Amino acid sequence: MKTKAGKNTQFALMLLSLASAGIATAQAPAPTKFCVLQAEAALVSTKDGQAAVAELQKILDPKKADLEKKQSAIKEKQDQLAKGGNTMSQTAKDNLTRDIDTMNKTFTREVEDYNAEAENQQRKVMDQLSSRMKQVLDLYAKDHGCMVVFNIADQNTPIVYFSDTADITAGVVDMYDKTSASPAKPAGAKPTSTTPSPTKPPAATGATPAPTTPSPAKKQP
């Protein structure tokens, strides 16, 4: 038979356990921070993302180089027509003009095909990375008290100012790489760099433009 003292001891221990549980619950902070993320930059700044972008460039770069050669050929024909306009026969000029027109139409069609393939391939890369990134972002946000995460790479996001401390891009990328099962890849651009995109093909006429990449949203003063 348990004594009254023994029952009192058990009751006191039970109350202590409940009190401890209450303290532990109270110590878990509710999310209160507003955080921002450069979503696309984060995706391609991970080791998986850099590897995927490198593979994408291997596919697209040879096609871009071929388009640049065809652009140069068109420009040579245009220069030939411009320089020989006063000395060439009308028949020769007409034939050269038709050649330029045909080359331009073919080139324009091939540029459109290139753009469609580049967009499709980039979409596949982003879709493959997004699923894993969502899991990491959820974990990071919970661990760091983020109540809301805004994607500042989206121009439609109504953010006019944010502090550096609110930007979790680098931290999310770091967590992604540390928790990823993929083998390590060579490090590349930092999360704050511009977002790599498939290289744009040259225009139909004129000088070949330098490859451009869209920049993530920047802080406003």
Image: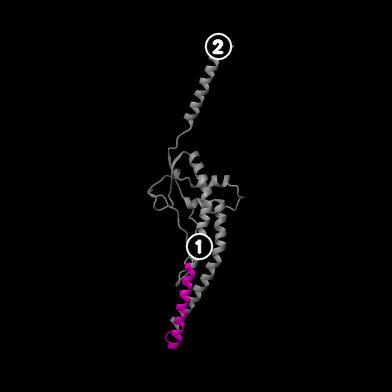
Relative to 179, say whether 24 is above or below. Answer: above
Element at label 2: helix
Can residue 88 be seen from the camera position used here? no
What span is colored magenta in the figure?
A: 85-112
Q: Which residue is drawn at 52% across and 57% down?
A: 124
Q: Distance between the residues labelled 1 and 2?
A: 79 Å
Which residue matches tag 1? 118
Q: Which residue is drawn at 57% across and 10% down?
A: 3
Instruction: Verify whether residue 40 appears in magenta.
Output: no
Q: Position of residue 52 (x, y in %)?
A: 56, 56
Q: What amino acid is labelled 2 in the image?
A: Ala
Element at label 1: helix
Relative to 187, say whether 116 is above or below. Answer: below
Q: Residue at x 52, y 72 (%)?
A: 69
Q: In which quarter of the image is residue 205?
A: bottom left
Instruction: Verify whether residue 111 appears in magenta.
Output: yes
| Of the image marks 1 and 2, the number of the one nearer the N terminus | 2
> Which label belongs to residue 5?
2
